[in-house]
Image: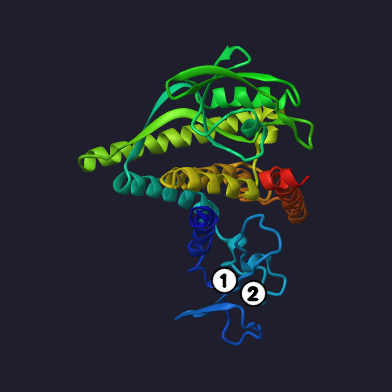
Amino acid sequence: MLLSISSSPVSHRIPHFISNFNNPTSKFPPKSKTHLPKSHLSAFSNQGLYVTKNRALAFPLGGFVGFPDNDPDSEIPVDDKNLLKNRPVLDRVIVVSAGIVANVIFAYAIILAQVIFVGLPVQEAFPGVLVPDVKSFSAASRDGLLPGDVILAVDGTELSKSGFDSVSRVVDVVKGNPNQNVLLRIERGNEDFEIRITPDKSFDGTGKIGAQLSPNVRFSKVKPKNVTETFSFVGREFFGLSYNVLDSLKQTFLNFSQTASKVAGPVAIIAVGAEVARSNADGLYQFAALLNLNLAVINLLPLPALDGGTLALILLEAVRGGKKLPLEVEQGIMSSGITLVIFLGLFLIVKDTLNLDFIKEML
């Protein structure tokens, strides 16, 4: 699970580095007085000494690749034609977009591996919401809900085959009725009956029952019979996941007030990955592919501090006939973006940590 999560930022950042590796500005002149701490990684080539400095930061907000352009201690002249900022527009576009392209390729490769080694999951939807697990001493356990039960209706409203929409319906009713009876119609084996559950009140005032909920679907694996079918399966799955990512992003912007609470940071992503690993290890393929596609799309947004923001500035320069924005303006734009990303990252870490089940139980 950790491998699938860590692979996304690694697959994104390494191409930025590699695409600029043959740039002479990556090396320090042989007579440079630059001191190399033991923690630095060095590689040699016939062009001179290349130095890669690695750094672990205190907050897990992501990663970055820095170039000599941004090193105030660099001995390379600021007007050196081989500095990234002084390279032609196309060169800079290739370096900046390398991570995005790599994430897309890596997502495709993950899906290809899934199709070849595991098979493509095919699901059949059934009415209701499945209860895979019930926590001990929770409201669900206390009031008679058992693992394996299927919730067919909540407060008289039938739940269809709509998957996550039905799950959201149950969650909304539970959250909106703390310390109040909620009527559930349950299917257990061949039995069909009703129970009443009284959600406990969470620290944030919403109701909770302590049960895991998921769409009532059954999965089977289908493996391709030949090479043509293999790439047909991969293409269908790849474009399906890509559409879901783009549609989710569109909904986030169009209905921000309703979707803002669902924006997740690294803590929530790890929690979801752990849940996927527990319930269905094969699902980690799709999870890793979705992570890479999300990372590609998010980084393509024209926002300061993201690759898309840098690309936007480069394209603006091209439109202006090679005339760059004043250095102070560019630095102001990027600094504001970095500040925003840091505060957003810290906010999401705190929010997602407080939403972890074991943290909620402690509060």
Taking 217 as reference, is 34 above or below it? Answer: below
Mark 1, residue position = 25
Tag 1 near tag 2, CB within 8 Å? yes
Residue toward you, 267 or 149: 149
Q: Which mark is residue 181?
A: none
Q: Is residue 45 left or right of residue 117?
A: right
Amino acid type shown at disc 1: Thr
Amino acid type shown at disc 2: Ile
Mark 2, residue position = 76
Q: Residue at x 55, y 55 (%)?
A: 9
Q: Secondary structure at mark 2?
A: loop
Task: Kindly indicate the quadrant of the structure image that contains residue 37.
Answer: bottom right
Residue toward you, 142 or 66: 142
Categorize mark 1 by other alpha carbons within 10 Å: few (<14), some (14-19), many (20+).
many
Q: Is residue 86 left or right of residue 94?
A: right
Q: Position of residue 232 (x, y in %)?
A: 29, 36
